[in-house]
Image (cartoon, helix red, strand yellow):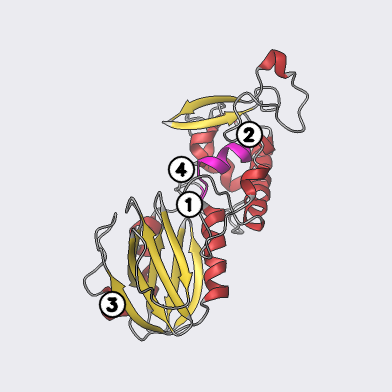
Amino acid sequence: MPELPEVETIKNALIKGIGQARILDVIVYNRRFRMTVPDDFKERILNATILSYQRIAKYIVINLDNGISIIWHLGMSGRIKIVQNIPKKNEKHDHVILSTDKGCLIFNDARRFGLITYCLTSCLDKFPPFAKSGTDPFSDTMTPLYLFNRLHNKKIPVKQALLDQSVIAGIGNIYASEILYDAGISPLRESASLSRNDCRKVVESVRKILQKAIDAGGSTLKDYHKPDGSEGYFQFAHCVYNKTGQPCPNCTCQIQKTGGIQKIVQGGRSTFYCATKQK
């Protein structure tokens, strides 16, 4: 699933590639996603002009001049493609096309775990996935004290807490492992055991790792590609994710004794870490 850096990269590509365009046509070939595309989706957005784009957690929000916002989530395998014109022949799994006076946006989703829908812009904070969403990693409210207050009563491992979207919105499995490695915090530690100084380290690493990933265009491991079809490059900078048994950078551990980077499963998700560096 695209995580915050990938969604931010896609949002920035839409700003650059489409910008404040007018929606000329809407073609829906398949309405069956995680949330069914509303029957009046075309009617509500046709002929409206795009005012702005924003990312909320792992969602792309496109705000229109008629008081409507398009809400887009890519699920496990979704892609947004930017092309010049409506294709004469669709690629497999092209389900929704938004045609504008500056190009076309195509929603391609093989598994259909994503969604595309709309909401009144004035009611975005009440849209179900946003209503219970935690703070954004780049928000001024994301402080060490905020994180300490959210974690100090939690008995679950800190890695799982970072994946809790009601605590911090947008962090997924790849970046949770990378963030904790950078902060030197073991993913096995109980959330409530983190001191305020530990929380400061985590907050700093959250912003550092996510910004580096955004700058690199995200991580392409399986399905993720940018709207122009190119790949992200942050996977080449991963320190621990999917590197079981390998030596980790900037560490004094002896791989012959430690076995290198370790992999465990927490809450059904793979976690990668260095037992020497992360305490």
- State whether residue 238 is above or below residue 112: above
Which one is closest to the eye, mark 1 or mark 2? 2
Residue where numbered disc 4 is placed: 164
- Whether residue 144 is visible to the viewer of this picture, yes or no, is no
Residue receiving disc 3: 42
- Sort mark 3 into few (<14), some (14-19) or many (20+) by Cα contacts within 10 Å: some
- x%, y% of residue 124? 39, 67
What secondary structure predominates along the stretch shown in magenta? helix
- SS for callout 2: loop
Please indicate whether residue 255 sits to the left or right of residue 150 in the image.
Answer: right
How many angstroms separate mark 3 from mark 4 (CA)?
Answer: 34 Å
Q: Is residue 203 visible?
A: yes
Q: Which residues are magenta?
A: 168-180
Callout 1–callout 4 Cβ contact below 8 Å: yes
Distance Cα–Cα, label 3 vs label 1: 31 Å
Left or right of 40 on screen, residue 209: right
Q: Report the front residue among 156 and 255.
A: 255
The residue type indicated by label 1 comes to Gly
- The residue pinned by badge 2 equals 240
Q: Which numbered disc, 1 or 4, marks the residue that appears first in the sequence?
A: 1
In which image quadrant can residue 61 be found? bottom left
